[in-house]
Image: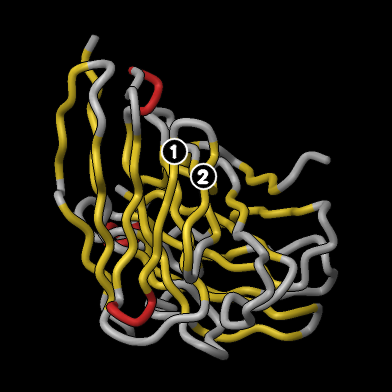
Amino acid sequence: NAGVTQTPKFQVLKTGQSMTLQCAQDMNHEYMSWYRQDPGMGLRLIHYSVGAGITDQGEVPNGYNVSRSTTEDFPLRLLSAAPSQTSVYFCASSYTLPGLATNEKLFFGSGTQLSVL
Amino acid sequence: GIQVEQSPPDLILQEGANSTLRCNFSDSVNNLQWFHQNPWGQLINLFYIPSGTKQNGRLSATTVATERYSLLYISSSQTTDSGVYFCAVGETGANNLFFGTGTRLTVIP
């Protein structure tokens, strides 16, 4: 198993450009999520999905869109990039929702370092 | 959302020393996980431990759910233990985990 695969690893954008961060998992996980990591702030949830066709907002959803057309893929779209979106982005997946006491761990991709100039 | 506080924020150890990292949380949880972010940025899941004690080699973790804290013990530290350790918690029925701001561990040879 490859686990959780994110692409690209690095990206530089100009303000106003759009782009899509790709995330795929091959573990048949129902739950997928996107976090951003900023210095001194830990990881904050952007969007999550509990299955194909089902998505919802997290703590910091503004400026981002997601869709979940298949179990495997969960892309994150930046609609019009802003310098405030400069961050490291992580995709994560788990077999079940974090709130279910099922002993299922959360697995992370390797991250995408995004700079918006 | 639930508040997660980790201490200490920074820790510098000599190789071979032991350490204890602490995670306090503000409400009842049924999901608590410890992660290690290595110097290359990769996040590795260490433990799923909403209560009780687990051990994995030189690492062990204890969560006292009734008192709302968890401890991560690292014994005989090695330089490869360096990085940031995160605690993340989830409430019953929650759709996400809330992360603390981490403890940055530096192990010097």
Which dot marks residue A31?
none
- Which residue position holds label 2? B55
- Name the one closer to the observer, A63 or B91: B91
Whether pointer 1 and pointer 2 mark residues with C-beta atoms closer than 8 Å, the reply is yes
Which dot marks residue B59?
1
- The kind of residue on which mark 2 rests is Gln
The alpha-carbon separation of the residues under discs 1 and 2 comes to: 6 Å
Name the chain under label 1.
Answer: B
SS for tag 2? strand
SS for tag 1? strand
Q: Residue at x 29, y 55 (%)?
A: A38
* Rendered-image quadrant of the C terminus of chain B: top left
Mark 2 neighbour density, 10 Å: few (under 14) some (14–19) many (20 or more): few
Asked if one can make out residue B18 in the rendered structure from this viewpoint, the answer is yes
Name the chain under label 2.
Answer: B
- Name the one closer to the observer, A82 or A110: A110
Q: From the viewer's perspective, is residue A62 above or below residue B55?
A: below
